[in-house]
Amino acid sequence: METITDFDIVIAVGGMAGGTLAWALSRQLPHLKLAVIEQQAADVPSASFDSRSIALAAGSVAFLQQWGLWQGLKASACPITDIQVSDRGHFGKTYLNAAAYQLPALGHVLEVEHLGQLLQQRLSETNVRHFQPDKIESLSQQQNFCRLQLSGGQEISSRLLVVAEGGLSPTRQMAGFSISEQPYNQTAVIANLGLDTSHHNKAFERFTADGPIALLPLSQQRYSLVWTCRPQQAAELIQLPEQEFIAAAQQAFGYRAGIFTRAGKRASY
């Protein structure tokens, strides 16, 4: 059994949160001894970097600029210059415009696979130690450090353990943190939708009785759709043929964003 005892910070899972943290720490505190434990093999995309898109507020973009990541992401990101928020069955609407806040954009929409590719490349050029593919089998908490037993047979310790595994975190359970869950009876269906015309960098959010529907502008004349609905409806939407899904999305949202012409791979959460 190999024992490594001198890590300052170990990050469990290098997805969007863990990978970005590892990169920021390696830049700002290069004297720290850092490690990332990642269950997926290096040539398999992390679950964090799937087909989803992420909406980055202007403040988040500023952090990515500070950490030297934005220059490698900007070409793949789509700016949001206008946002319209509405509520089905109600008259009022809210409009937000970047120019009114003296900003070039209120935020940007980025397909997260681009962030995953960039982080993998940048972290490979640092001294961050990767245990991959690997996972934490057990942990014990001491006064000044955590001792971790990895499935690969190694035992390591760290002054700080960062658990960035997401909602269904086995390490959180090992550490004894309890959670409180409340079902919303909602499922989000996501897909990328093609448009018949430019979206002019405009985002939409529409509230309905079943939950919000959002359209976020993407590159190549596309929208990222987030459609919140009842679980049974979500299951039916996932199974619809492409043209029927497009028709259902058009009926649910209307034509204020344009005419939807195609739909990419669908997923639900």
Image (cartoon, rainbow, N blue to C red):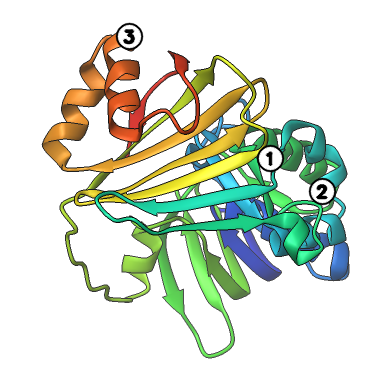
Front in this rendered view, residue 229 or 96: 96
The three-letter code of the residue at mark 1 reads: Leu
Q: CA distance from mark 1 to mark 2?
A: 9 Å
Mark closer to the observer (3, 2)? 3
Quadrant showing the C terminus? top left
The three-letter code of the residue at mark 3 reads: Gln
Is residue 29 shown left or right of residue 9? right
The residue lying at 23 percent from left, 73 percent from top is: 180
Residue 128 drawn at (x, y percent): 76, 54
Residue 241 drawn at (x, y percent): 27, 9
Along the polypeptide, which appears first: circle 1 or circle 2? 2
Disc number at residue 69?
2
Q: Which residue is mark 1?
A: 115
Question: Which residue, as the protein is rendered here, is positioned at the far left?
Answer: 232
Mark 2 closeness class: few <14, some 14–19, many ≥20 residues within 10 Å: some
Q: Which residue is mark 3?
A: 243
Residue 187 versus residue 35 in the image, above or below: above
Front in this rendered view, residue 228 or 30: 228
Residue 23 versus residue 252 in the image, above or below: below
